[in-house]
Image (cartoon, rainbow, N blue to C red):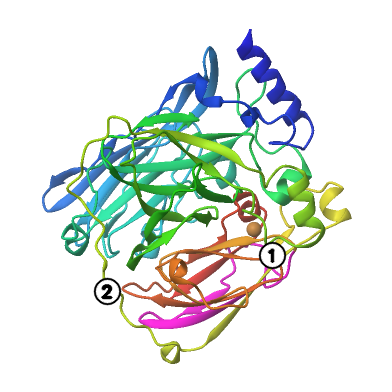
């Protein structure tokens, strides 16, 4: 009976546009449900003839996010989401991806520097029933990257249903640091994804023009596929690698008792030095690598705080705030009463970053992000051409940018819209030169593949293109609010 009420109030919340509003399900102690934290299975592949080989199956599945209610999902070797793949810098990997979904898909290697043909973007469709076997060398430094569907106009819905997974990369340098690194023990991966549900337990994806415009925001947050789970920490020093795998939601992450944590890495790998923080913002597609001291043995809740959208200005920001897109809510509970002492530690110095001089860039590339607002947007249409980069919507037959291999470019990313957009560039890990009118702070000094540009803001980033060129097959660059990507805010980049 209780559960029914719980769901019906959810339905009320989703019937209008407002979610996470007055009817928020998180306005009471959701941890009473006592759901267990789930660690995605680790899959290190099999060494065959000098290659590390993975076999993946894109499949349909069914989950019980709410007891007694079934949700139709898709996943990779699992009903929902996929295993955490793991490899080491220098490995040659081969991934055999069979598509058993009943419809076309793709698998994109987010954050990897790799040949364009292996990238898994809209040009590398895996037809229903077919197997695609990309092979590439691991060039990236130690980091947590990820993989997900990237089918033209369908990325949002396919990721929403579950087509995503983590990919952890190691290297000698990181392995010599004695950081917490025992997978699932003191090195805990976390995928955050907000979702909406219908009364029958099925996922509710975009159902209004407004949701297409702002991107879908759910009123439940899945943590590795579980709503508000509780983790029993095993070690007093625990590392969390967190992916914002949501389609559109920004999080301002922190702990319920305001305890500080150490940020040790960003999208593309470790920082030079740890940075002590109380809160950190995470845009869609971004990752953080943090270490938390749990030695007081107290329960603590990982939360998202109000302020994730604090820099949104004007009507849109107000609208989104009023709609409950920027409120405080709980994500997961951590119990550490049985946590054991740890031999791991966070050193004062992590890794050395190469020095990149902006003077070495071959030029400045202007990227203008825009969205069509008002009557055309709200009043109907197919919603597929309301988002633009440099005035154009995504076209598979048009190349938007040509870069030269083994060069740096400075990208000036200008947001001429009233919403923040997280711009993701394939095949590179870049560095931030300036962001929203200021220099990046220490927490923003790392390697990134996705940068969030505030409404009417500007970012300058230094972007390397290394290792591979291809005169025909492009990489993508796009907004990682997936409804914006699907709606046209994407361009094609050739590296020649
Ligand atoms: Cu966007």
Q: Residue furthest bottom?
A: 359
Q: Position of residue 419 (x, y in %)?
A: 70, 60
- Marks 2 and 1, how far apart at CA: 37 Å
User: Would you say residue 101 is visible in this rendering?
Assistant: no
Q: Position of residue 179 (x, y in %)?
A: 23, 54
What residue is drawn where x is 52% and y is 54%?
Answer: 282
- Disc on the earlier residue, 2 or 1: 2
Q: Residue furthest top?
A: 1
Q: Nearer the viewer, residue 138 or 313?
A: 313
User: Would you say residue 282 is visible in this rendering?
Assistant: yes
The residue identified by callout 2 is 352
Q: Please tell me the numbered disc located at residue 173.
A: none
Q: Position of residue 182 (x, y in %)?
A: 22, 43
| For residue 345, side relative to residue 409 (left or right) | left
Which portion, as a residue range, is magenta? 389-417
What residue is drawn where x is 34% and y is 72%?
Answer: 468
Q: Is residue 464 above or below residue 214?
A: below
């Amino acid at each position: 009976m209780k559960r029914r009420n719980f769901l019906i109030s959810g339905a009320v919340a989703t019937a209008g546009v407002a979610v996470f509003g007055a009817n928020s399900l998180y306005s009471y102690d959701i941890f009473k449900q006592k759901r267990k934290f789930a660690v995605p299975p680790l899959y290190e592949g099999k060494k065959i003839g000098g290659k590390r080989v993975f076999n993946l199956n894109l499949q349909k599945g069914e989950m019980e996010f709410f007891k007694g209610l079934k949700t139709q999902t898709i996943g990779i070797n699992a009903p929902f989401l996929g295993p955490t793949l793991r490899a080491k810098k220098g490995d040659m990997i081969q991934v055999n991806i069979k598509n058993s979904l009943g419809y076309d898909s793709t698998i994109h290697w987010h954050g990897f520097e790799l040949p364009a043909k292996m990238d898994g973007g809209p040009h590398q469709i895996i037809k229903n029933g077919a197997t695609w076997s990309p092979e590439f060398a691991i060039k990236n430094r130690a980091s947590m990257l990820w993989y997900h569907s990237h089918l033209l106009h369908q990325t949002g819905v396919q990721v929403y249903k579950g087509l995503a997974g983590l990919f952890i990369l190691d290297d000698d340098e990181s392995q010599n640091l004695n950081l917490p690194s025992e997978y699932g023990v003191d090195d805990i991966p976390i995928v955050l994804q907000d979702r909406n549900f219908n009364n029958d337990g099925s996922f509710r994806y975009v159902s209004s023009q407004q949701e297409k415009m702002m991107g879908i925001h759910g009123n439940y947050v899945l943590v590795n596929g579980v709503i508000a789970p509780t983790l029993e920490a095993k070690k007093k020093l625990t590392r969390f690698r967190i992916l914002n795998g949501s389609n559109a939601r920004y999080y301002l992450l922190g702990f319920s008792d305001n305890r500080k944590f150490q940020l040790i890495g960003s999208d593309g790998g470790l920082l030079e030095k740890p940075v002590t923080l109380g809160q950190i913002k995470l845009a869609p597609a971004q990752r953080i690598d943090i270490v938390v001291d749990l030695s007081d043995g107290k329960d603590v809740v990982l939360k998202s705080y109000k302020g994730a959208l604090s820099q949104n200005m004007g009507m849109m920001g107000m609208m989104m705030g009023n709609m409950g897109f920027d409120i405080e809510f709980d994500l997961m509970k951590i119990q550490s009463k049985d946590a054991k002492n740890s031999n791991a530690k966070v050193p004062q110095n992590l890794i050395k970053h190469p020095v990149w001089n902006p003077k070495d860039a071959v030029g400045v590339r202007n990227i203008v992000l825009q969205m069509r607002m008002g009557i055309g947007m709200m009043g109907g249409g197919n919603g597929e051409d309301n988002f633009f980069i440099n005035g154009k919507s995504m076209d598979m037959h048009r190349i938007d940018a040509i870069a030269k291999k083994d060069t740096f470019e400075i990208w000036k990313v200008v947001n001429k819209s009233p919403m923040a957009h997280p711009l993701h560039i394939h095949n590179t890990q870049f560095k931030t030169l300036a962001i929203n009118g200021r220099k990046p702070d220490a927490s923003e000094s790392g390697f990134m593949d996705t940068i969030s540009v505030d409404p009417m803001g500007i970012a300058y980033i230094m972007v390397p293109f290394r290792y591979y060129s291809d005169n025909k097959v492009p990489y993508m660059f796009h907004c990682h609010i997936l409804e914006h990507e699907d709606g046209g805010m994407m361009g094609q980049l050739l590296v020649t």
